[in-house]
Structure formats: C-alpha cells, structure tokens
C-alpha cells in the first residue's frame, strides 16, 4: 500500500514539475499531498471521458465543490487555485470543475486533460 501511495505521489510530482510549475502555490502542494494520501483511490470515472478531438456533452453535477470568488467563468482542473473545495470528489488533480464569478462550482469528473502534464493550461495565468 505504501508503494502505491508513493507511486501516485511520484507521478503527480513528476507531472507538476514537467508542467513547469516549479514555484507552485501552497494550495497546489496541499492538494497534491491530499491526493497522494488518498491511497490511490481512483475517482469514479463514469460517463464519457473527454479526449482531445472527441468531446462529448456530459452533465456538470453539484457535488458540494466551491471556487474562489471572482474566478472567471470556465472549466478548471482541480489543482488550479480557483478550485477551493473538491466537494465529494475523491481526488483533486484528475478532475474537472466549472467555476463561476460568485464562487459557485459544479463537477464534471475525470478528464484526461487534468490527468496529464498539461493540466495547468486550464488554469488562468
């Protein structure tokens, strides 16, 4: 079990470094640690996976997540600073959330984009 936790942590750490986020924010580091501590619990990947060039509609559900007030309307990966609570989602990093300026949030679930080294492209600069 420890090996699995370490492996997941190492994968996410490598992903973060390869994404060019050397000066990461404290919230990113905390989210990364919480994902590693989850012990590899995989997010329920129900519905259609969003792959580049193969986008399909799916519901954005209210799972209790929240976003920072003043965030631009849009889709964010869980490691983005705009996502302040993941609600009932098992993991931060591999999931996609929709934020609005008033701090509202809904949950799309797993997306391959957020589970890749390019997740930070869904965070505003």
Image: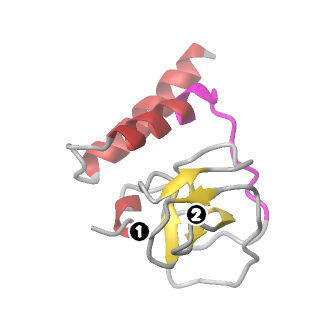
Query: Relative to the observer, which residue lies in front, 122 or 74?
Result: 74
Main SS type for the magenta part? loop
Please state the horizontal and vertical placement of residue 58, each as a whole percent of the image: 73, 78
Above/below status of 39 relative to 73: above
Please state the horizontal and vertical placement of residue 37, each as a whole percent of the image: 58, 26
Please state the horizontal and vertical placement of residue 73, each as a whole percent of the image: 50, 79
| Marks 2 and 1 in Cβ contact (< 8 Å) | yes
Q: Who's the residue at 46% across and 30% down the image? A: 9
Cα–Cα span, label 2 and label 1: 9 Å
Lower sequence index among marks 2 and 1: 2
- Range of residues picked out in magenta: 35-46
Query: Relative to the observer, which residue lies in front, 2 or 98?
Result: 98
State the colouring used for the structure image. secondary structure
Query: Relative to the observer, which residue lies in front, 60 or 2?
Result: 60
Q: What's the mark number on residue 96?
A: 2
Q: What's the mark number on residue 122?
A: 1
Q: Who's the residue at 66% across and 56% down the image? A: 65
Above/below status of 16 relative to 103: above
Please state the horizontal and vertical placement of residue 114, each as a whole percent of the image: 49, 60
Q: What's the mark number on residue 75?
A: none
Q: Who's the residue at 45% across and 34% down the image? A: 30
């Amino acid at each position: 079990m420890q090996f699995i936790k370490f492996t997941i942590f190492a994968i996410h750490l490598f992903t973060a470094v390869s994404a060019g986020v050397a000066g990461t924010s404290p919230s990113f580091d905390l989210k990364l640690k919480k994902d590693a501590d989850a012990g590899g619990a995989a997010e329920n990947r129900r519905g259609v996976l969003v792959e580049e060039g193969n986008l399909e509609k799916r519901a954005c559900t209210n799972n209790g997540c929240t976003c920072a007030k003043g965030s631009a309307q849009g889709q964010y990966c869980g490691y983005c600073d705009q996502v302040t609570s993941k609600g009932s989602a098992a993991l931060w990093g591999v999931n996609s959330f929709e934020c609005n300026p008033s701090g509202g949030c809904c949950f799309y679930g797993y997306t391959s984009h957020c589970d890749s080294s390019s997740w930070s492209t869904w965070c505003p600069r």
